[in-house]
Image (cartoon, coloured by chain):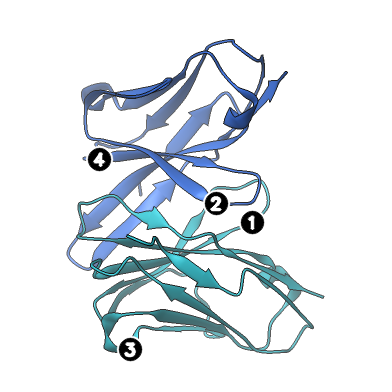
C-alpha cells in the first residue's frame, strides 16, 4: 500500500495560464475525490469519481475546472485561465467504498501570480 | 446540508499536558473521521469512528452519535503533535459521496 500520490507538489503559474494536476489513488480503491483548501479553512469538496464515472461536482467547480479519471485509475484536475482566487492547496483522496475511510495525498499547492 | 463545528479554534499546550478537542455535527453521521494536518499540509488519518471509543497510543476518540458530537483526547502531548486537527463527517447516498470538514483546531505544543 503506497498511499495516495499527487504531482506536482507545488505549482506557480501566471494568471491566465492553464494547469493540470495528477492524482494516483491507492491501487484497490475505486472511489476518488478532489478537495480544495484555502488558508485557515478546512478542505472543501470539489468532485467525486466512482471508477471512471464522475458522479458529483460541487458548485465550487466552475466551468474553468475539469476533472477526468480515464480507465478508473489515476485522475487529472485541470484549471483553465487561472485566476488569483484559484491559489489553494488541491487535495486528492481515495477510498475502497462509499462507507470506508478516505485517505488523502500530500496535495498540490497552487500559487497564481 | 450538515454543519460541522470544532472547538477550541486554537490551543497552546506545554509538552506533557493533556487536551480534549471537540467536534459537533448538526445531523446524524455514520462514520466520523479525525485527521491531523502536519505543517507540510498532509492530512493524516487518525480515527474512523462510527460510535464508541477507539484508542491509538496517546490518542483516543469518542463519538456519541445520538448527541452529535465527538471528542479527540491527546495525552502526554509532544511537540510533534502540533498542527491542525480536523474532524470530517461523511455524506453519502446515491451519487453523493464526500466529507464535510470542520474549521479545525490549531494545536501548538511548546517544549
* Classed neighbour count for the residue bearing mark 4: other residues with Cα under 10 Å, few (<14), some (14–19), many (≥20): many
Which SS class for mark 3?
helix
Which SS class for mark 1?
loop
Asked whether the beta carbons under mark 1 and mark 4 sit within 8 Å of each other, the answer is: no
* Classed neighbour count for the residue bearing mark 3: other residues with Cα under 10 Å, few (<14), some (14–19), many (≥20): few
On the image, the x and y values in percent for residue A18 come to 65, 89
Which numbered marker is on residue A38? 1
Q: Quadrant of residue B23?
A: top left
> Looking at the image, which is closer to me, A66 or B14?
B14
Which numbered marker is on residue A70? 3
* Classed neighbour count for the residue bearing mark 2: other residues with Cα under 10 Å, few (<14), some (14–19), many (≥20): some
Vertical relation: A74 (above or below) B100: below
Q: Give the residue drawn at x 51%, y 53%.
A: A43
* Chain assignment, label 3: A
Colour of chain B, in one word, is blue
Asked whether the beta carbons under mark 4 and mark 2 sit within 8 Å of each other, the answer is: no
Q: CA distance from mark 3 to mark 2?
A: 26 Å
Which numbered marker is on residue B31? 4
Q: CA distance from mark 1 to mark 3?
A: 28 Å
Q: For mark 2, what is the residue?
A: B42
> Looking at the image, which is closer to me, B40 or B103?
B40
Amino acid at each position: 500500500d503506497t498511499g495516495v500520490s499527487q504531482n506536482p507538489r507545488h505549482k506557480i503559474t501566471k494568471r491566465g495560464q492553464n494547469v493540470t494536476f495528477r492524482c494516483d489513488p491507492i491501487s484497490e480503491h475505486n472511489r476518488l475525490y478532489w478537495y480544495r483548501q484555502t488558508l485557515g479553512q478546512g478542505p472543501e469538496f470539489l468532485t467525486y469519481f466512482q471508477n471512471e464515472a464522475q458522479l458529483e461536482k460541487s458548485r465550487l467547480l466552475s466551468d474553468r475546472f475539469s476533472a477526468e479519471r480515464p480507465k478508473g485509475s489515476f485522475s487529472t484536475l485541470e484549471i483553465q485561465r487561472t485566476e488569483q482566487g484559484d491559489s489553494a492547496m488541491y487535495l486528492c483522496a481515495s477510498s475502497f467504498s462509499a462507507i470506508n475511510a478516505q485517505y488523502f495525498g500530500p496535495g498540490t499547492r497552487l500559487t497564481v501570480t | 446540508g450538515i454543519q460541522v463545528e470544532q472547538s477550541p479554534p486554537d490551543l497552546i499546550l506545554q509538552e506533557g499536558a493533556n487536551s480534549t478537542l471537540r467536534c459537533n455535527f448538526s445531523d446524524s453521521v455514520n462514520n466520523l473521521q479525525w485527521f491531523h494536518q502536519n505543517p507540510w499540509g498532509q492530512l493524516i488519518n487518525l480515527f474512523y469512528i462510527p460510535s464508541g471509543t477507539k484508542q491509538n497510543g496517546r490518542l483516543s476518540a469518542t463519538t456519541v452519535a445520538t448527541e452529535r458530537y465527538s471528542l479527540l483526547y491527546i495525552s502526554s502531548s509532544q511537540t510533534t503533535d502540533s498542527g491542525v486537527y480536523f474532524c470530517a463527517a461523511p455524506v453519502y447516498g446515491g451519487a453523493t459521496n464526500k466529507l464535510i470538514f470542520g474549521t479545525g483546531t490549531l494545536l501548538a505544543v511548546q517544549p
